[in-house]
Image (cartoon, helix red, strand yellow):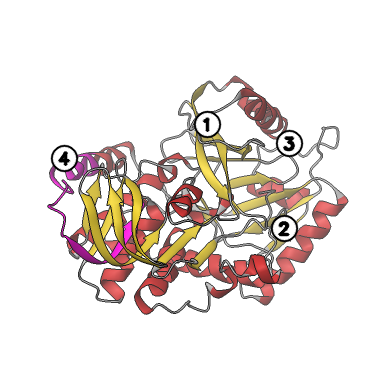
C-alpha cells in the first residue's frame, strides 16, 4: 500500500496551490473551435486531454460554469475498481483501471493512486451467490478477483466485526486486489495541467445557456460570459445536469439526478488499509492518506440538485459502518456533503451520439463515475474525434433504451446503485 509522509503531502498540496495561482487563468476564447467540451470535471478534462494528445486536434475548449474539478469530481469517495458483472461494463471499467495504473506517469503528476484492494461484503446467502457469480465472470474477463470467507476477510481487515451476532452477519466477500483509491481533485488537476500544456483552452466561470442550432445540427454553444462560441462538435459531460443541457437541444434523456451523500471523519492514525463496501446496507469506507475515514452512502431516493446531505441516509449508513467497525464509534465526524449523480434505468452510462447532429453526451454514470474517469475520457475522445463509436462504448448508446438491450448493473456490481 502506498503511503506518504506528512512533509510529502504538504509539498504536494503546496505545489497544487502554487499551480492554481499561476495557471489556467481564462484565455481569450476563440470564435470557433473544432470541439467544445461542456463540463470541466474529471471526465471532461480527460476527454480534452486525449483529444489533444491522441487525436491531435488543435482547437479544443473546455467550458466550466464554476471552477475546474469543483463539481462531483471534488465530492466523491475516491474508490477505483473494475469488478462489474456484465461483460460490457466490466471491460469498460477494466480499461479505466489499466489507465489508472499508469496515470501518474502519463500525466507527470501524482494522482495518488493506491492499489490497496477492494472488499465487497456478503451478508446473505443470495449475496454470496451473487459474489461467486460476479467473481467467476470477472475471471472469465481476465479481471482479478477472489471469494473470501470471514476468516480470509479478517486477515485483510483485522478490525472488522465478523461476529455472527450482528444485524447483518458477514458471510464472505469478493476481493479485488488491484482496486483501491485515488486523490479525486488531483485527477482533475493532472488532466487540466496536461490538457493546458497541449493548447486546450480552459474557460472557467463560463456557463452554457443554450445551443446554436441549425435545424437538427449543432453549430456552437451559447454562454453567459462569451456569447456564442462556434464549434464543429460539442461533447456534454456535466454529471447531474445532463438532462438540463439535453432540454436546451430539444430532447429528453432517460436519466434522473439524485443527491449522493458522503462524509469524512477527523484524521486518525492508519488503521484501515483497504476499501470495505457493503451492498446490503450500501455503506463503504476507506482511510485517506491524511488519515480521514472516508464514508459513502447511497443516493437519496428523491430527485434533486442539492449538493448537501440529509440525515436519514447518513444515519442508516453510520449505523451499518459502526456495526462493522465498533471502534469507530468514538471518531468525530468532520464534514458531510452531497454530490449530484445522473442515474439511468440500468445503472450504466450513456456514451455517444444524441438525436442532434454533432452533439454527443457522456452521462448517467450513477455511483460509478469517478472510477471510470480515464476510460470514460479515452473512449469519449474517440467518439468525438472519429465520429464513430468505439467498441467499448457501443453498448452504452442511447439506442439501447429503444432496443431493450440494457446493461443492468443494479446490485450486480457489488453495490446497489
- Residue at (27, 65) in percent of width and height: 231
Determine which of the numbered discs, if any, sits on residue 21 in the image.
Answer: 4
Q: Which residue is mark 3?
A: 161
Closer to the camera: disc 3 or disc 4? 4
Task: Check whether the beta carbons of the residues at disc 2 and disc 1 lie within 8 A of each other.
Answer: no
- Residue at (78, 63) in percent of width and height: 132
Determine which of the numbered discs, if any, sits on residue 412 in the image.
Answer: 2
Q: Nearer the viewer, residue 122 or 10?
A: 122
- Residue at (31, 40) in percent of width and height: 66
Judge the density around disc 1: few (<14), some (14-19), many (≥20) Cα neighbours within 10 Å: many
Q: Which residues are magenta?
A: 14-39
Judge the density around disc 3: few (<14), some (14-19), many (≥20) Cα neighbours within 10 Å: many
Q: Secondary structure at mark 3?
A: loop
Determine which of the numbered discs, if any, sits on residue 263 in the image.
Answer: 1
Task: Check whether the beta carbons of the residues at disc 2 and disc 3 lie within 8 A of each other.
Answer: no
Q: x, y percentage for residue 110?
A: 31, 54
Q: What distance separates the C-alpha of mark 2 from that of mark 1?
A: 25 Å
Amino acid at each position: 500500500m502506498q503511503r506518504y509522509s506528512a512533509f510529502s503531502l504538504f509539498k504536494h498540496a503546496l505545489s497544487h496551490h502554487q499551480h492554481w495561482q499561476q495557471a489556467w487563468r481564462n484565455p481569450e476564447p476563440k470564435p470557433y473551435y473544432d470541439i467544445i467540451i461542456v463540463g470541466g470535471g474529471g471526465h471532461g478534462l480527460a476527454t480534452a486531454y486525449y483529444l489533444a494528445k491522441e487525436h491531435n486536434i488543435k482547437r479544443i475548449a473546455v467550458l466550466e460554469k464554476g471552477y475546474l474539478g469543483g463539481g462531483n469530481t471534488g465530492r466523491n469517495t475516491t474508490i477505483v475498481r473494475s469488478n462489474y458483472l456484465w461483460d460490457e461494463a466490466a471491460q469498460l471499467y477494466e480499461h479505466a483501471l489499466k489507465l489508472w495504473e499508469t496515470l501518474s506517469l502519463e500525466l507527470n503528476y501524482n494522482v495518488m493512486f493506491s492499489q490497496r484492494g477492494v472488499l465487497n461484503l456478503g451478508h446473505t446467502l443470495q449475496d454470496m451467490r451473487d459474489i461467486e457469480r460476479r467473481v467467476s465472470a470477472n475471471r472469465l474477463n481476465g479481471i482479478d478477483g477472489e471469494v473470501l470467507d470471514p476468516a480470509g476477510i479478517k486477515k485483510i481487515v483485522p478490525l472488522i466485526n465478523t461476529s455472527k451476532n450482528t444485524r447483518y452477519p458477514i458471510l464472505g466477500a469478493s476481493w479485488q486486489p488491484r482496486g483501491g483509491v485515488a486523490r479525486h481533485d488531483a485527477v482533475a488537476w493532472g488532466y487540466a495541467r496536461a490538457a493546458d500544456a497541449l493548447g486546450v483552452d480552459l474557460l472557467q466561470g463560463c456557463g452554457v445557456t443554450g445551443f446554436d442550432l441549425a435545424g437538427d445540427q449543432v453549430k456552437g454553444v451559447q454562454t453567459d460570459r462569451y456569447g456564442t462560441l462556434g464549434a464543429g462538435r460539442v461533447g456534454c459531460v456535466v454529471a447531474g445536469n445532463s438532462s438540463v443541457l439535453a432540454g436546451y437541444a430539444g430532447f429528453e434523456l432517460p436519466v434522473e439526478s439524485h443527491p449522493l451523500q458522503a462524509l469524512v471523519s477527523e484524521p486518525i492514525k492508519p488503521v484501515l488499509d483497504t476499501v470495505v463496501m457493503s451492498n446490503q446496507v450500501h455503506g463503504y469506507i476507506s482511510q485517506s492518506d491524511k488519515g480521514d475515514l472516508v464514508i459513502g452512502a447511497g443516493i437519496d431516493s428523491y430527485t434533486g440538485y442539492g449538493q448537501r446531505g440529509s440525515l436519514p441516509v447518513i444515519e442508516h449508513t453510520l449505523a451499518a459502518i459502526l456495526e462493522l467497525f465498533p471502534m469507530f464509534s468514538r471518531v468525530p465526524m468532520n464534514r458531510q456533503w452531497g454530490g449530484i449523480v445522473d442515474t439511468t434505468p440500468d445503472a450504466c452510462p450513456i456514451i455517444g451520439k444524441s438525436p442532434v447532429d454533432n452533439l454527443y453526451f457522456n452521462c448517467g454514470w450513477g455511483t460509478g463515475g469517478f472510477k471510470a474517469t480515464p476510460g470514460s475520457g479515452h473512449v469519449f475522445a474517440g467518439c468525438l474525434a472519429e465520429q464513430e463509436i468505439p467498441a467499448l462504448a457501443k453498448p452504452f448508446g442511447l439506442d439501447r433504451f429503444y432496443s431493450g438491450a440494457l446493461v443492468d448493473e443494479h446490485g450486480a456490481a457489488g453495490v446497489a446503485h
